Amino acid sequence: VPQAKPLSPGEVLGCTAPAGLCDCSIEGTCKEEDACESKSGCGDDNCCQATAAAPVADATDAGEKVMLFVADGRFHLEAAMISNPTLRALRYDPYNKALTEERYETDKMKSIRNKSIRRAMDPSAKTFGIILGTLGRQGNPAILGQIRQLLTKHGKTSFVVLLSEIFPQK
């Protein structure tokens, strides 16, 4: 994984998942003209529930490029899969020593987000909830303030919910 500063080489956060991994050479270095860029991930359970991990099938193409993710979670892997939707994704969980093939329904995620954006743009939408992440460095009170000012400027009211993690059960 190319380094996304200020992270150490190989470290991936949802907000720094590298895009363009399929443009990288087999050795893992990006071509200069196709430098990897950061993109945001989502970890949206609506997009991955129907595509649970499956045992790894044999590769049919010896030249196939595969993303291998070594970790026990899915959130950061999902961010990398969203940023690189054409790559086959494998995850090795060092705790249960399992290698699985992972899938993410990027088109479904984009459709869900687009529908939510359209609903928010409807003139009848008057009140907005803003979730501010409290885990690590995720929450930014200055950006929260700017968003609330923009909403007020457009005649909308808002409320803030502080959460360490966002998932449907919360």
Image (cartoon, rainbow, N blue to C red):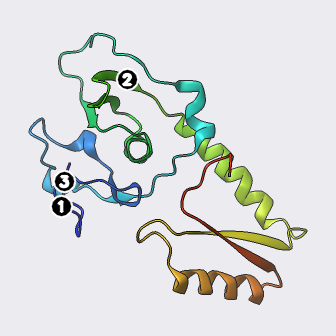
Residue found 83% across the figure and 85% down from its top: 155
As drawn, the label of residue 2 is 3
Residue 59: image quadrant is top left
**Marks 1/3: CA–CA distance:** 10 Å
As drawn, the label of residue 8 is 1
Contact between marks 2 and 1 (CB within 8 A): the answer is no
Residue 127 in the figure: left or right of residue 88? right
**Marks 3/2: CA–CA distance:** 22 Å
Relative to residue 142, is residue 37 depicted above or below? above
Q: Which residue is mark 2?
A: 101
Mark 1 vs mark 3: which is more N-terminal?
3
Circle 1: element type: loop
Mark 2 vs mark 1: which is more N-terminal?
1
Q: Which residue occupies the extreme right position in the image?
A: 124
Relative to residue 56, is residue 128 depicted above or below? below
Note whether residue 108 is visible.
no
Residue 146: image quadrant is bottom right
Relative to residue 159, is residue 73 depicted above or below? above
Note whether residue 78 is visible.
yes
Residue found 54% across the figure and 62% down from its top: 164
Give the image location of residue 42, x and y in percent. 51, 51
> Hey, what amino acid is under mark 1?
Ser
> Hey, what amino acid is under mark 2?
Glu
Q: Which residue occupies the extreme front position in the image?
A: 95
Circle 2: element type: strand
Residue 33 in the figure: left or right of residue 170? left
Relative to residue 127, is residue 48 depicted above or below? above
Give the image location of residue 5, x and y in percent. 22, 68
The nearer-to-camera label among 3 and 2 is 2
Give the class, few, some or many, for how many residues have Cα within 10 Å of label 1's Cα (few <14, many ≥20): few
> Hey, what amino acid is under mark 3?
Pro
